[in-house]
Image (cartoon, helix red, strand yellow):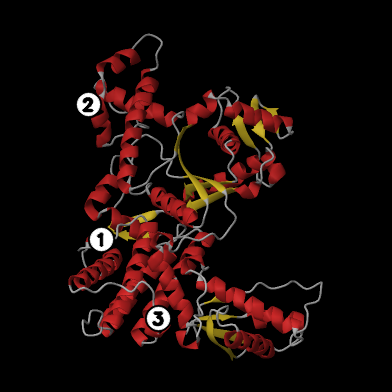
Amino acid sequence: MTDARPEPAAAQPPIRSQVRTAVARAWARAFMSGNLPQIERDQPVPAVEVERPANPEHGDLATNLAMKLAKPLRRAPIQIAQAIADELAWEIANAPAQSPLASASVAAPGFLNVRVSNATLARTLDGILAAPADWGRISVVRPRQVNVEFVSANPTGPLTIGNARGAFVGDLLCRVLEAGGQRVTREYYFNDAGGQIRNLGASVVALKRGEPIPEDGYHGDYVEDLLAQLPDPVWAAANEPGVDAADAIGQWAARQVRGGIEASLTHLGVRFDVWKSEASLHADGWVGRAIEKLRERGHVYEKDGAIWFASTAFGDDKDRVIIRSNGEPTYFAADIGYVAEKFSRGYDHLIYIWGADHHGTVARVRNAAEAMGFDQQAVQMLLYSWVRFVRDGVEVSMSKRAGNFITLDELLAEVGVDAARWFFASRGATSAIDFDIELAKKQSAENPVYYVQYAHARIASILRKAAEVGLTPAATLDPAALEGAPEAALVRSIVRYPEVVEDAVLVEETHGITAYATELATTFHAFYRDARVIEESEPDRSRARLALAEAARVTLASALGLLGISAPDRM
C-alpha cells in the first residue's frame, strides 16, 4: 500500500490554499464533464473563497462558491454545490495523494462543507517538526520594496505612552509584512527644522538664565535634566554675537532628546533602518527639486508673494501654500520633498503611520505625489487611534508640554515589554484602546499574554519531563494518531496558523494573531487535560502526542515572535 503523502510537508502550501485549489479543480472537472455549464463571456468569474464555518461540526472549511455561481450558471445553488461535491468525492477516491480532503458535503442553501484528511494534517505537522523556523511564513502578494515610516515624534521630549502607539503599530506592521514576503525598510522622520525645536531651546535658555519659561515653551522635568547636561562650550557658543541662542540650544537639546528616544525604542525592541532628518531634505535640495517638478508639470503658481500647490485640481477643498510670502517653506513643502526622496530610493510602496490628528494631511500628500507623476495608490497612510491609559479605573492624563505625562520607559518598567506589546497588538490600529495598566501587570490567567506564555512554558516543561524518561516527539506522524478527539481538536487549531498570518498580512493588522494565540493556548490546555501525554507503557502514543505538543509549542513561539513577544520555557 502506497503512502498518500508524496511531498515533503515543508513544501506544502497552507491547508486553506490546498482546499481552495481542490475546489477549483473540482469546478473545472464539473465543467469539462458537462455537469456544469460554462459562464457566459460577459459574466465575471467569481473567485473561489474558502473560510472556517461558524459551526465546526459542519466541517473544517466551507465555500459559498455555488451561491456565487447560481446567477451566471442559471442553476440552483444546491445543484451546483452537489456537482462540485461529486467531483471532490471522485478525487478523494481516485487520487487521494492529490486531494487534501477526507469528505465533502452539501448544506442548504448551497454551502459546500469539507473535512480535511488526517493524512493532510499529519503531513503538515511533519513539516512543522522538520522546519520549525519556516512555519507560518507565507507569500500572499508579489514581493515589494516597502518603506514604513512610523513614530517620527518630534525630538522635543521623551516618548510618552500616548505618542508611542505609533511605535507598536509600525513595528507590528513591519513584522507582518515581512512574514508575508515583503522587503521592508523601517524609517523614522525627525522634524528638526521647525519652531518647536527653537521653543525647546528657549525653555532651556530661560532656565539657564533664571528666567520664566516662555508660554509656548516646555515645562517637563526633562528640561531641567537637559539643563544639567548642557556643556559649557555649547552654552558659550550659543551666546556668541549674532547667534540665536534659543535655536542653537534647541538643536543641541534635540540631539540629546533624540538619543533618549532611540534608547527607549531599543528597549521596546523596535529597530529602524533609516533615521531621516527634515533639515536634510532642505539641505540636500529635495524640497526645492520637488517644487520644481511640480512647477514643470504646471501644478504650482504664485499668489500674494507665496508659492501655492494647486491641490484643488486633485480633489482637495483648497490649494495649499508650500513657500510662504517671507520665503520660508511650509511643513507641507518638506512632506512633498520627502515623497520624492523616498521614491528615489527605489521603493514600490510607501506607508506612513500617523496619529488620527493628521487626517487633514493625507489627501494633500497623496495629491502631491500624483502631481509629481507617482502612483497615488503607492502612497498609503495608516491613521491610528489614540490610547486612553487607565489605572484603577481613572484615566491617566498626559501633556508633554506641561510636563504631566508618563514616558514609554516608565510604562515598560511597570508592565514589561511583552505585556505592552500584547495589549497594543490585540486591537486594530484604528480602534481606540483603554489600556488597563494594572491588568497588564497581573501574573495570572486574567492577563492574556501571561496565559499564552504560560501555555508555551507548560509544553516546554512537558517535553523536559518526557526526555527524562526517554521519550521524545515522533519525527513523523501516522495519520491514525490524529483520530482521537483531543488530538483532532489540537491539530486543527495548530494547522490554522498560516491562514491567520495570511489574513493579518492582507488586512495589515495583528489582533487576529493575538486572538489565535489565545485560542491555541486554550485548546492545548484542554488537550493536556483530556490526553495523557507521557505514558511510558504506551511509548508510540506518547511520542505522537509529544509531537503534537511540540508542534503547538513551535506555533505559539512563532505567533509570539511575530508580535515581538518572548516565549519563555519556564515561568
Q: Camera-side residue: 446 or 87?
A: 87
Q: Is residue 303 above or below residue 345?
A: above
Asked whether the beta carbons under mark 1 and mark 3 sit within 8 Å of each other, the answer is: no
Mark 1 vs mark 3, CA separation in Å: 30 Å
Residue 180 in picture, x, y percent from top left: 51, 57
Give the mark nearer the N terminus: 1 vs 2: 2
Q: Is residue 473 above or below residue 203?
A: below
Q: Secondary structure at mark 1?
A: loop
Mark 1 vs mark 2, CA separation in Å: 41 Å
Horizontally, residue 467 falls left or right of residue 80, namely: left
Q: Mark 2 = which residue?
A: 228
Give the mark nearer the N terminus: 1 vs 3: 3
Q: Camera-side residue: 564 or 391?
A: 564
Tell me what residue is drawn at x 34 percent, y 22 percent. Answer: 249
Q: Secondary structure at mark 3?
A: loop
Tell me what residue is drawn at x 24 percent, y 30 percent. Answer: 224
Horizontally, residue 39 falls left or right of residue 494, namely: right
Few, some or many residues within 10 Å of mark 3 (<14, 14–19, 20+): few
Asked whether the beta carbons under mark 3 and mark 2 sit within 8 Å of each other, the answer is: no
